[in-house]
Amino acid sequence: EVSRVYSRMTNCFVKNEIVVKGMNCNHCKSNVEAAIQKVTGVEGVEIDLASGRTIVHGNPSKDDVVKAVESLGFSVVEG
């Protein structure tokens, strides 16, 4: 079960699911994983290429995760 817990007080993920739109190959998936992994506070990333379902583990800033994905030309939708 995926917990979609988001702390509005700290603007940080506890563990969250987002959907990344626009990925259509493993190269895209790898680039998104690498970009998210570089965000301070990220402890792990799981991505399902077919659905775009992305689980971010750790306590990064939500804005930083979104910016990392969008910097690659993809869009983010709350899970």
Image: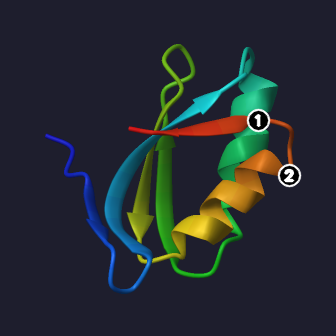
Question: At label 1, which amino acid type do we have?
Answer: Phe
Quadrant where the N terminus sits is top left
Give residue 46's position: percent from left, percent from top.
46, 43
Give whichever of 61, 1 is nearer the camera: 61
**Mark number, residue 71:** 2
User: Can the viewer see residue 35?
Assistant: no
Answer with left or right where residue 77 lies relative to residue 24: left
Name the element at disc 1: loop
Question: At label 2, which amino acid type do we have?
Answer: Ser
User: Can the viewer see residue 19?
Assistant: yes
Farthest residue to the bottom: give it: 10
Which class describes the residues within 10 Å of circle 1: few (<14), some (14-19), or many (20+)? some
- The reply to whether discs 2 and 1 touch (Cβ–Cβ < 8 Å) is no
Which class describes the residues within 10 Å of circle 2: few (<14), some (14-19), or many (20+)? few
Relative to 29, is 23 above or below?
Answer: above
Q: Quadrant of residue 30?
A: top right
Give whichever of 72, 6 is nearer the camera: 6
Name the element at disc 2: loop
**Mark number, residue 21:** none
For image coordinates 75% across by 17% down, the residue present is: 25
Relative to 34, is 77 above or below?
Answer: above
For image coordinates 71% across by 44% down, the residue present is: 32
Relative to 20, is 17 above or below?
Answer: below
Give residue 39's position: percent from left, percent from top.
66, 72
Answer with left or right where residue 13 lies relative to residue 73: left
Answer with left or right where residue 47 lies relative to residue 66: left
Answer with left or right where residue 23 lies relative to residue 61: right
Question: Which residue position holds label 1?
Answer: 74
For image coordinates 76% across by 35% down, the residue present is: 74
Quadrant where the C terminus sits is top left
Relative to 11, is 52 above or below?
Answer: above
Farthest residue to the left: give it: 1
